[in-house]
Amino acid sequence: MNALLLDNIRTLLGSLSHEIRLLDHLGRSLVPADAADFYLPEQLPAGDIVPFRGSFYLRLAGEDGLILLSGPNPQAEDMLRLAESAVASLIRLQPPQDALQAAYLRLVAEQPDPLEQAGLIREHRIPDQLPRCVLLLRPQAVRQPAYDFLRDLVPLGEQDVLLPLDRGCAILIQAMEDGQGPEEAEEFARALEETVREESGQGLHCGIGDVAPRAADLRQSYAQALRMLEIGPAFLPGGSVYAWRSMLLARFLAEVPPERARYYHGLLFNKRTASLFSEEMLETAAMFLEKNLNLSDTARQLYIHRNTLVYRLDKIQRRCGLDLRRFEDAFLFKLLLDLNNTLMIPNKRPEDGR
């Protein structure tokens, strides 16, 4: 069932003076969502109120086997009829899922003006004051459309929405619960990447935008997630999850014009230093930076003697004047090295906010 519709039914049933539950066709409680299970009568014709084990059951007509349940109460039958009528009205008023998806796509991936934004939010009952993150999901090496591939693999919360963007990418709009932020979205993406790999043997790249506090801000979170998919693989070639909040340096470097990036990168990495910066030496320097300038950890990770590491760092210092054991020199080395990555990414500059 549509999460938004379920939320509206929850609000409706919660306003009644007598508790009415909504069950699925297996007897699992949907409203309230307390993981309770109920035995159902063997015969439960749609529209009939059936007493069973001290409670009263009413199956809704033509609505995927949804069932209303009331406990023992003199007014149970009247309340069930009232709930039946109200829930049926909500279902009739709910926009078709295709229309709701189209509204979200218009709101997120296009640029409607503020008046149209407000109309989409109101007409399709899209929650407005709800913090959400936009995640762009791009499966690797799959033959079917990304949305079709992912819809059975992505666990959705009640307020989450999965949308098809194009053949290679799907959009996940993930609601943030109280106290949650981009860090939780990153954890979710890494867990999803692991699930996809276990289930299909394929990889998954994910770009994550910042938290959008309102529905009208989803466009900005989408633009940020899209930019992460553009620049993430260049700056983190072995990675799969690229979050806006976690890649500030990469975002900064990606804004450097290509001609300036090429110039400053060439100040250190050029024909004169080509023999120094072999693949082995670059791997050593990169690992030393990754291990926060810790000699012992770096040597252990590279399976080399500590003295060998010191010899290589000394060699870099003698040839180009940068001592990577000093923070300032290490930071400068990384900046100049990473500027080369800006030459391998698209030159798009979406409206990303700050």
Image (cartoon, helix red, strand yellow):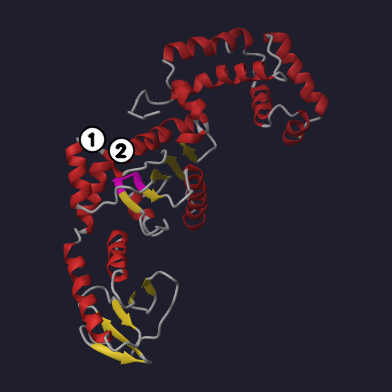
Point out the image quarter for the N terminus.
bottom left
Give residue 39's mark: none
23 to 180, vertically: above or below: below
C-alpha separation, residue under disc 1 versus residue under disc 2: 8 Å
Q: Which residues are magenta?
A: 164-172
Q: Is residue 66 left or right of residue 330?
A: left
**Marks 2 and 1: in contact by CB < 8 Å?**
yes
For residue 315, which quarter of the picture? top right
Give residue 111's mark: 1
Secondary structure under the numbered disc 2 in the rendered image: helix
Q: Residue at x 23, y 73 (%)?
A: 63
In the image, residue 2 lies at what x, y percent?
A: 29, 61
The front one of 18 and 162 is 18
284 to 71, vertically: above or below: above
In the image, residue 133 lies at what x, y percent?
A: 40, 44
For residue 284, which quarter of the picture? top right
Q: Is residue 165 magenta?
A: yes
Quickly name the residue at label 2.
219
